[in-house]
Amino acid sequence: MGGTRTAAELDQEAAVRRALEDFYRDGRPPWDSGVTPPELVALTEGPDALAPGQALELGCGTGTNAVHLARHGWRVAAVDLVERAVRQAREKAAAAGADVTVLCGDATRLDEVGVPGPYDLFFDLSCYCGIPPHRRDAYAAGLTKRAAPGARLLMFGYGPEAFDDPISGVTADELIARFAGWRLADVTPGTNPVPTFWFTLHRAATA
């Protein structure tokens, strides 16, 4: 997870950051629709809703889903790599009167961000699937370190077939391999024109 990064790895990280910054500079990215997905709504509303606790959103964008969680009683921290998105998320939370802590930082370097946890719920809307492979173990370790017993991770991701480059996308087998101490409880295909999936992982109830 640590150690010296190669030139190729540094290039990958810089390319991801540039691409994200370009999306937010040019307008709303396709994953930042301004509408909370029904998969998250199902966890916060209705007879099967989770009891509110502490939640951490990875790659929060302009804050739509973090605000939704806060409105439903969750204590929410949210992280995004792009300063422009973070500013918009803070403005959205303030306008909604939602108590959300929005921080600018790298989801694979949570020790540097200031989100100690523990968290009962993690939410990731296409953040992980764009992370270069050499940083994905660090992402998993950061969440695991901050997970309360029995924590849940709800992740939306694009399948590798959705991209032209070889480093993007996510599969169920990869999540099983990387998230030690977690159980992949559900995989539901998305409704997008390219392969997408909703993954639900549960942290063990005891350490």
Image (cartoon, rainbow, N blue to C red):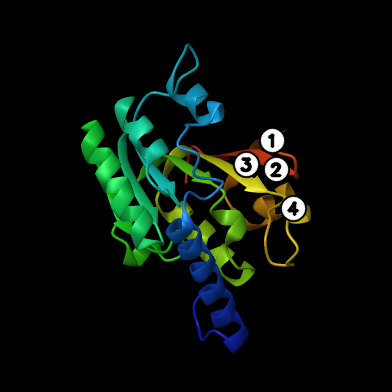
> Which amino acid, mark 2?
Thr
Q: Are the residues at dot 2 and dot 4 in contact (C-beta closer than 8 Å)?
A: yes
Residue 162: mark in rendering: 4
Answer with mark 2 or mark 4, whichever residue precedes in sequence: 4
Residue 196: mark in rendering: 2
**Mark 1 = which residue?**
190
Q: Estimate the spatial distance between the alpha carbons at disc 2 and disc 4, rounded to whole Å.
A: 8 Å
Q: Judge whether residue 116 can be spotted in this image.
A: no
Q: Are the residues at dot 2 and dot 3 in contact (C-beta closer than 8 Å)?
A: no
Q: Give how far across and how far down residue 28 sits, in percent.
A: 48, 49
Answer with mark 3 or mark 4, whichever residue precedes in sequence: 4
Residue 183: mark in rendering: 3
Residue 49, above or below 63: above
- In this rendered view, identify the residue nearer to me: 140 or 183: 140
> Which amino acid, mark 4?
Ala
Query: Going by the picture, which residue comes out furthest to the top?
Result: 47
Point out the frontmost of discs 2 and 3.
Answer: 2
> Which amino acid, mark 1?
Gly
Q: Residue at x 63, y 47 (%)?
A: 157
Q: Is residue 204 left or right of residue 121?
A: right
> Which amino acid, mark 3?
Arg
Q: Is residue 207 left or right of residue 128?
A: left
